[in-house]
Amino acid sequence: MAVLQQYKCPCCDGAIEFDTDRQKMKCPYCDTEFDVETLISYDNELKNQQDDSMTWNTAAGGEWQEDETKKLRVYTCNSCGGEIITDETTAATSCPFCSNPVIMMGQFSGVLKPDYVIPFKLDKKAAVDALKRHYGGKRLLPKTFKEQNHIDEVKGVYVPVWLFDADANANIRYKASRVRVWGDSQYTYTKTSYYSVSRGGTIGFERVPVDGSTKMDDALMESIEPFDFSDAVDFQTAYLSGFFADKYDVDSNQSLHRANERIKTSTENAFAATVQGYSSVIPVHSSINFENGVARYALYPVWLLNTTYNGQKYSFAMNGQTGKFVGDLPLDKKAYRKWLFGVAGVVTALSFAVSYLIWLL
């Protein structure tokens, strides 16, 4: 059976976790605080602890099929002895019986250790408050959603992220045009001049992020960017205590395609912004080559919130460092139709007014 890591308070033996406000490990029972660095040696001692030896009667129930069990992991909580069932990528969670934070140390075996981690700066309450603010000012949001809405789940997750550095050498050619219009008493003249415009140069990119977990929606993850890497620290498992964490199931090589897309698009946009003074600019050919490409592995803090309305699930995400919040909301169709008809009525009235003025002239 895989090994769980928990951090025990040396003072009261309670389970301690990372405090986002103090940026330290804190015991919720006796309020004792610890620097993360002081727990590194403690961490090494915990790794040598022996697991509990427990025997279970497995005669009850039917047999699992191989395709059902290959992605499941079963752990035993060191605090209460309860069994914790997770999927193959969960690396940190909490016990559903005693709520103590636990880290699945066995999940890290055979995979790369993260280079960096950005610790959570915002807590669960901040995520819930951000969701309520997200509702504000939404005139087309169903009233019953605001009044009856309840949050099904709120969890802080460290999402695995691949960070890519590269120098992009680009040569891009555009077809551009300038249009000049003039006239006399009889004719209007139009002259269109065409140009071949070239741009070339190098742009350096640092830490372009690509989500390394299939469970995290890529669009949602990219929507809460950017993360401030100046807060990143060298990875220590202590930062995971009290939060969920996924290990990557998309490796760096599998993430290259998305990294290439992001760098290529940013490079093309940057060069296109330098082509000015033309009526139209159309890219004709783009050649982008990467040099000094390096990938690093980090964990980024994200609060995930889920709620259900009329049988449909709505998911939200908040940057656990900056507080940037995103997520879709339901639409009050009746209110939307009223708004749409109102806009149509205003447009019709304006059209009538303009037509009347023209008739008067």
Image (cartoon, helix red, strand yellow):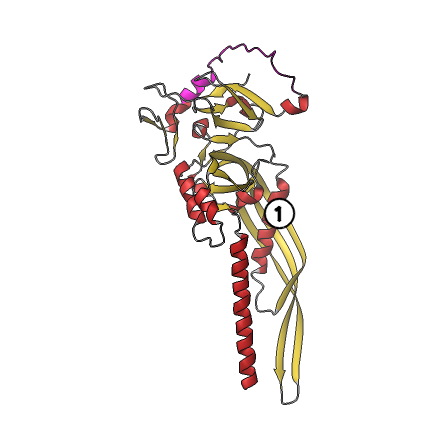
Position of the C terminus, as image quadrant, is bottom right
- Magenta-span inclusion, residue 295: no
The foreground one among 288 and 237 is: 237
Q: Is 113 on the left-hand or right-hand side of 172? A: left
Residue drawn 65% across and 83% down? Answer: 188
- The answer to whether residue 108 is above or below residue 305 is above
Q: Position of residue 59 (x, y in %)?
A: 61, 11
> In this picture, is 80 found above or below 168?
above
Answer yes or no: is residue 228 visible.
Answer: no
State the residue position of label 1.
261
- Horizontally, is 134 left or right of 214 in the view? left
> Percent x, y for residue 292?
58, 42
Q: Is residue 65 left or right of residue 293?
A: right
- Nearest to the observer: residue 187 or residue 126: 126
Q: At 33% across and 19% down in the image, what residue appears? A: 12
Pick the front one: 172 or 201: 172
Q: Which residues are magenta?
A: 41-64
| Neighbourhood count class around disc 1 (C-alpha, 10 Å): few under 14, some 14–19, many 20 upward | few
In the image, 312 versus 77, the foreground residue is: 312
Residue found at x 62% / y 41%: 256
- For image coordinates 63% across by 90% down, the residue present is 185
Query: Which SS type dominates the magenta stretch?
Result: loop
Q: Of all residues shown, which one is farthest toward the bottom?
A: 185
Report if residue 56 lies within the magenta region: yes
For the N terminus, which image quadrant?
top right
Badge 1 amino acid:
Glu
